[in-house]
Image: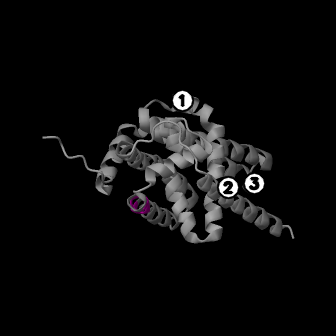
Amino acid sequence: MNPVISNKLISINEILRGAWRVYSDKFLVLVGIAVVPHLLFFFAEIAIGPGSPLGDFAGVLFSAAGIAFSIASAVALVLVVSRGGDVISAYRDSTPYILSYFWLSVLGGLIVFGGFVMLFAPALIFTVWFIFGVFILVLENKKGFYALLASKEYVRGYWLPVFWRFAFLFAIFSALSYFFTLIPSSSIFNALFGTMLSPFAVAYLFMIYKNLKELKPVSGETVISKSTRNLFIFSGALGAVAILAFVFSEFL
């Protein structure tokens, strides 16, 4: 008798167990990757603080480095969670993806923000659609619109189950983040919170992505339909216009 293959997404409990297994097995490497941008932003805060001998220029340099390493660390975490490695090799292997991931983040961010301008619901739909974009960029080598659309294709038919699993993670992290804001010197604790838990979030989302890929593999080149492309372009343009309007209003 052939085994019955379920087409249901794995449960939150299974995701948590799988994510914890990956997180605990690779804990030192994951935390080592995540801590770098937090340290750079911490040094930037010290540099621009009162009485600091470093000055604003050093603060700008540390901030710029923090942004660059934030992008690289997002890719490096995906690499380690999916295939292993050490801190140095993960950062080294992330460099070819930095510009692509930056563009993917800008593109997805503009489309989501455009959806928020239209109504809250489209922004939420787009967010869940695009949540696996970085995994598709790094592990399937699809970029820009193609990574976003491939993520949408994985989620199609599973939007609500993916949403509830993402909402669970978001609710837990939001509660913990709020708790840390109540502690004196909360900026330090927030940095510690981000360093410790952001790798777990990547492992958690990777478990969902891996399961979706098993349930409905996307093969070959993903074709963007005209209607989907127009929707993305319209929402992205709307998001860009809204951001520019807000920026210009600050100077009026």
Dot 3 amino acid type: Gly
Q: Nearer the viewer, residue 41 or 174?
A: 174
| Magenta part of the chain | 163-168
Instruction: State the CA–CA distance, disc 2 to disc 1.
Output: 37 Å
Q: Residues within 10 Å of mark 1 (few under 14, many from 20)?
A: few
Q: Is residue 167 magenta?
A: yes
Q: Nearer the viewer, mark 2 or mark 3?
A: 2
Q: Is residue 236 magenta?
A: no
Pointers 2 and 3 in contact (C-beta within 8 Å): no
Residue tagged 1: 88
Q: Which quadrant, please, contains the C terminus? A: bottom right
Mark 2 near mark 1, Cβ–Cβ under 8 Å? no
Q: Tell which circle, 2 or 1, labels the residue nearer the N-terminal end.
A: 1
The outermost residue toward the left is 1
Question: Residue at 43% across / 64% down in the picture?
Answer: 171
- Residue to which mark 3 is pinned: 51
The residue at the point 52 percent across, 28 percent down is 89
* Front residue of this view, candidates 252 and 130: 130
Front residue of 156 and 119: 156
**Separation of marks 3 and 1 at Cα, in angstroms:** 34 Å
Q: Is residue 186 left or right of residue 207?
A: right
Is disc 3 placed on a helix, strand or loop?
loop
Residue drawn 32% across and 56% down? 12
Question: Percent position (x, y) of residue 77?
Answer: 49, 40
| Crowding near the residue tagged with mark 2, few <14, some 14–19, many ≥20 C-alpha atoms within 10 Å | some
Are there few (<14), some (14-19), or many (20+) residues within 10 Å of tag 3?
few
